[in-house]
Image: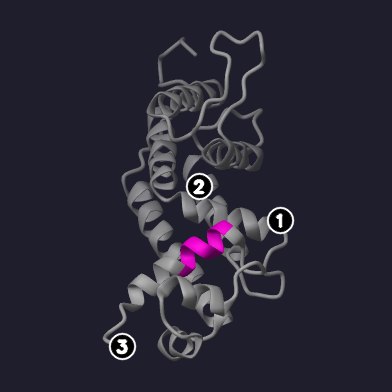
Amino acid sequence: MGDVDTGHLMDLAMRLFAELGYDGTSTQLIADAAGIPAGRLVELVGNKAQLYQAVVARSQEAEEHAVEAALDAFVPTRQGVIDLIDALLDFYADHPQFLTLWLHRWAGDAADMPGPEIYIRGLSQRLADAIKDVVEPDIDLDHLVWTLVWCIFGFLTSGVQPAASAAHPGYRTPYDPRSLIGFRAYLHALITRLTRPPAGSTAL
């Protein structure tokens, strides 16, 4: 049968888990997509539960690497918050399957499997710790962090359906570069209104 690239198997499993969820994906389905017998798949990468855990761990590792780089470059200013959120937006825009994997989890998929919830909570806490000195005192820090996360996840998974009276009616897909530019500008405006201006500045 020849050598089988386990990285390719992981990629296939990620795609299927992201599209169908853990509960909707079988070992046989992954094996069929890879063109190998189910027994061979298990021999190479483990059973479905083990493969799912490996996929989650790999996605968390990639996310953590990106977050670490963004936090290492973070400067505690309004622009620093914008740069930090831009880095997260860019990462998730480049890895949409990570988002759909998490969305399945939040919808109750793989309820009996260890998941990324602890990691997600840790990530939100690290973001909050980084930006806390830049946020306006009357703004709830946890709500702000999750507002930004919800906005990014929501846009990248659903796009925008403007009201009929909007200046640009019609569905705006997250895969359209123009829509992404517009969404990024919105995030910047949101951050600007909820964080402290530079010292000595009177502008919003």
Residue 54 visible, this angle: no
State the image coordinates of residue 13 (x, y, percent, origin top left).
48, 69
Q: Nearer the viewer, residue 152 or 29?
A: 29
SS at circle 2: helix
Residue under numbered circle 3: 1
Give the distance between the C-alpha atoms of the residues marked 3 and 2, in whole angstroms: 47 Å
Q: Earlier in the sequence, mark 3 or mark 2?
A: 3
At a point 37% along the width and 35% down the height, the residue shown is 83
SS at circle 3: loop
At a point 41% along the width and 20% down the height, the residue shown is 199
State the image coordinates of residue 169 (x, y, percent, origin top left).
58, 14
At a point 41% along the width and 65% down the height, the residue shown is 61
State the image coordinates of residue 200 (x, y, percent, origin top left).
40, 15
* Mark 2 nearby-residue class (10 Å; few <14, some 14–19, many ≥20): some
Q: Nearer the viewer, residue 83 or 195?
A: 83
Q: Nearer the viewer, mark 3 or mark 1?
A: 3
SS at circle 1: loop
The circle drawn on residue 119 is none
Residue under numbered circle 2: 127
State the image coordinates of residue 176 (x, y, percent, origin top left).
42, 30
Name the amino acid type tagged 3.
Answer: Met
Task: Answer whether residue 125 is magenta in the image.
Answer: no
Q: Which region is colored magenta?
A: 13-19
Q: Is residue 5 above or below residue 92?
A: below
Name the amino acid type tagged 1.
Answer: Ala
Q: Main secondary structure of the magenta part?
A: helix
Q: Earlier in the sequence, mark 3 or mark 1?
A: 3
Q: Quadrant of residue 18?
A: bottom right
Q: Is residue 161 left or right of residue 184?
A: right
Name the amino acid type tagged 2.
Answer: Leu
